[in-house]
Amino acid sequence: MDHKTVIWQQPKAESDDRDLVQALWRGSKLHCPQCDKGKLFTSYLKVTPTCSECGTDYTPQRSDDLPAYLVLFIVGHIVVGGMMSAEMHYDWPVLWHMVIWPVLCVVLTLALLPPVKGAVVAMQWALKMHGFSKYPDGDDQPVLRPVETHNDALTRPSL
């Protein structure tokens, strides 16, 4: 008797490894994390829909509030450390503190937001988060597909 056995297996995934460190570096330079040639932003914080050089689609990116949280964390540590150091080692007038630290906060925040947002978008691209994966469920693995066999015994596919 010939029995039909259906085995579910995943087809081999394409090797599409993306270097996270390289992508973060390229994104922080405001360049495309894939080709390093195209611009990542069309304006100060607006991500371009597609790379002008390689055509990478950036519409799935969802950086949301993470860049702002990271910048606040970085700037807060720099400014608080500077304030404490200035108080311990120097005898500055209060007016200097009132001028220097708020201005430093604004300047650092405006300077760090684009590179940090670029790094966050590049991280999403490198880790295939959201819509940056080739598969509809966002997972890096393809969907299981049935494979029919005509063996009498159940066989396991080789990994």
Image: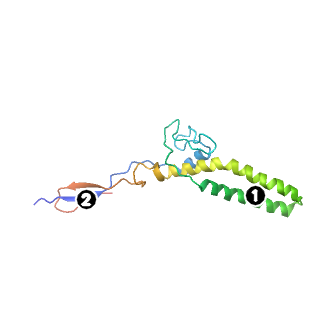
Kind of residue indicated by mark 1? Val
Say the numbered circle drawn on residue 79.
1
Helix, strand or loop at mark 1: helix
Classify 10 Å Cα crowding around label 2: few (below 14), some (14-19), many (20 and above).
Answer: some
Residue 3 left/right relative to 89: left
Type of amino acid under label 2: Ile
Q: Residues within 10 Å of mark 1 (few under 14, many from 20)?
A: some
Furthest toward the top, the residue is: 53
Q: Distance between the residues labelled 2 and 1?
A: 60 Å
Q: Quadrant of residue 150?
A: bottom left
- Of the two numbered discs 2 and 1 in the rendering, the one whose residue sits closer to the viewer: 1
Q: Which of 27 and 19 is in front in this view?
A: 27
Label at residue 7: 2
Foreground of the two, 58 or 6: 58
Q: Is residue 157 visible?
A: no
Mark 2, secondary structure of its residue: strand
Q: Where is residue 53 in the image (x, y as percent from the top left)?
A: 52, 35
Determine the residue positioned at 54% across, 51% down.
Answer: 123
Q: Is the C terminus in the top left, top right, bottom left or bottom right quadrant?
A: bottom left
60 displayed left or right of 105: left
Residue 151 % position (x, y): 17, 58
Where residue 43 is drawn, which disc sits there? none
Residue at (52, 49) in percent of width and height = 61
Residue 4 is left or right of residue 138, and the answer is: left
Type of colouring: rainbow
Residue 16 in the image, given as x and y percentages of width and height: 44, 47
In this rendering, does residue 120 appear at all?
yes
